[in-house]
């Protein structure tokens, strides 16, 4: 049996291009005692994947040249010699951009497709969901009546952050690219206001949308937008640094905030969020989020692209702002 997979061929300088990747069809190895075979059904595509390609110190080891590209996955166990997993189980883990995976079962957890669509376990009930939940509630510490601004608001993390902030009684302003995304934030996700960074002056639009200033800023993009928001923050504001997608493909040094002295003037704090720090509390977050989905307080939007062959182009959708909601690659038709 052949396995389709995407391997890292070379480290990119700037954007990941076609020569960054090697498409390979390899033989699926025979199972050894303690191993199981997973047929992957959905692959998670996340902005953080670009950072995993860099040979630099970070919160996680870089993907090695020649290795299968790391990615979150959910799939079905089709054969097992592991007593903890049976044929027919559905499992979630980080098995990479491939059609089949042989694993010893470590770092896998079972999921139930009857409780939620499988793709949800890569999005709202997976790493993006946990990131948004803990980043906002533990690091941002929102209080009812405060103003929350979210960048990358139409993405998997940003959309959830805004909805949780609304549940907590906050005024929520999203920043996204394009009129369609801004309408989605207001009309479908219930944001109070949306700013189109492609057509509006962000600093001026923030003043209009946040007449009482900004108490919490959840930053997914960095760069000029982070700078603009820093000019509008209130006393004791909290800035949550989740990502900086505007900087990931730079061929020049990362642009840091030139308005950082606003943190001093307003006695504000800026703190990073790495989701893996909260693993022990994942069950709490999943229970809360699942409850909000069931009650209709949280709406889920997945952007599904079919075909593992489309991985390189689909990944780049994240950096071109072409996805609406959580971007996932569907491997097959099952």
Image: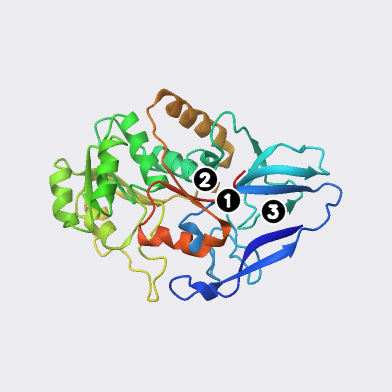
Q: Nearer the viewer, residue 328 or 293?
A: 328
Residue 88 figure quarter: top right
Q: Is residue 267 visible?
A: no
Residue 48 lies, in percent from the top left, at 48, 58
For the residue labelled by badge 2, is the local secondary structure a helix, a strand or a loop? helix
Q: Are marks 2 and 1 in contact (CB under 8 Å)?
A: yes
Q: Nearer the viewer, residue 107 or 295?
A: 295
How far, Cα to Cα, is label 1 from label 3?
Answer: 13 Å
Going by the picture, which residue comes out furthest to the top?
295
Residue 231 lies, in percent from the top left, at 19, 55
Sequence order check, earlier mark of 2 and 1: 1
Q: Which residue is mark 1?
A: 72
> Viewed as shown, does residue 258 lie left or right of 23?
left
Residue 294 lies, in percent from the top left, at 45, 25
How far, Cα to Cα, is label 3 from label 2?
Answer: 21 Å
Residue at image point 40% right, 76% down? 251
| Mark 3 Cα-neighbour bin, 10 Å: few <14, some 14–19, many ≥20 | many
| Mark 2 Cα-neighbour bin, 10 Å: few <14, some 14–19, many ≥20 | many
Q: Which residue is mark 3?
A: 100
**Quadrant holding the C terminus:** top right
Q: Which residue is mark 2?
A: 127
Residue 282 lies, in percent from the top left, at 55, 37
> Taking 27 as reference, is 205 above or below it?
above
Q: Are marks 3 and 2 in contact (CB under 8 Å)?
A: no
> Viewed as shown, does residue 72 lie left or right of 199?
right
Sequence order check, earlier mark of 1 and 3: 1
How far, Cα to Cα, is label 2 from label 1?
Answer: 8 Å
Comparing labels 3 and 2, the label whose residue is closer to the camera: 3
**Count of picture labels:** 3
Q: Are marks 1 and 3 in contact (CB under 8 Å)?
A: no
Q: Is residue 65 visible?
A: yes
For the residue labelled by badge 3, is the local secondary structure a helix, a strand or a loop? strand
């Amino acid at each position: 049996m052949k396995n389709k997979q995407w391997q890292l061929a070379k480290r990119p300088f700037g954007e990941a291009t076609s020569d960054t990747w090697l498409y390979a069809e390899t033989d699926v190895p025979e199972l050894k005692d303690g191993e199981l075979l997973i047929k992957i059904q959905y692959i998670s595509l996340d902005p953080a994947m670009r950072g995993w390609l860099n040979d630099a110190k970070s919160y996680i080891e870089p993907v090695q040249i020649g290795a299968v590209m790391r990615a979150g996955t959910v799939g079905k166990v089709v054969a097992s010699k592991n007593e903890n997993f049976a044929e027919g189980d559905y499992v979630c883990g980080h098995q990479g951009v491939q059609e089949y995976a042989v694993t010893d079962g470590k770092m896998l957890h079972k999921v139930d497709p009857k409780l939620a669509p499988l793709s949800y376990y890569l999005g709202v009930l997976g790493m993006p969901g946990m990131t948004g939940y803990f980043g906002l509630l533990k690091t941002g510490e929102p209080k009812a009546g405060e103003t929350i601004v979210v960048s990358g608001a139409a993405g998997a993390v940003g959309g959830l952050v805004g909805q949780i902030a609304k549940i907590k009684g906050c005024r929520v302003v999203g920043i996204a690219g394009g009129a369609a995304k801004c309408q989605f934030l207001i009309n479908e996700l219930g944001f109070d206001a949306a700013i189109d960074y492609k057509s509006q002056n962000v600093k001026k639009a923030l003043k209009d949308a946040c007449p009482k200033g900004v108490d919490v800023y959840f930053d997914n993009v960095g760069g000029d937008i982070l700078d603009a928001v820093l000019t509008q923050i209130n006393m004791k504001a909290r800035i949550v640094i989740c990502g900086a997608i505007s900087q990931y493909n730079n061929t020049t040094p990362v642009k840091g905030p030139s308005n950082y002295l606003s943190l001093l003037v307003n006695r504000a704090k800026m703190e990073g969020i790495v989701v893996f720090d909260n693993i022990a509390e994942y069950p709490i977050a999943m229970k809360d989020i699942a409850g909000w989905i069931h009650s209709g307080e949280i709406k889920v939007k997945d952007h599904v692209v079919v075909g593992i062959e489309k991985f390189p182009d689909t990944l780049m959708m994240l950096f071109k702002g072409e996805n609406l909601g959580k971007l996932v690659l569907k491997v097959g038709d099952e």
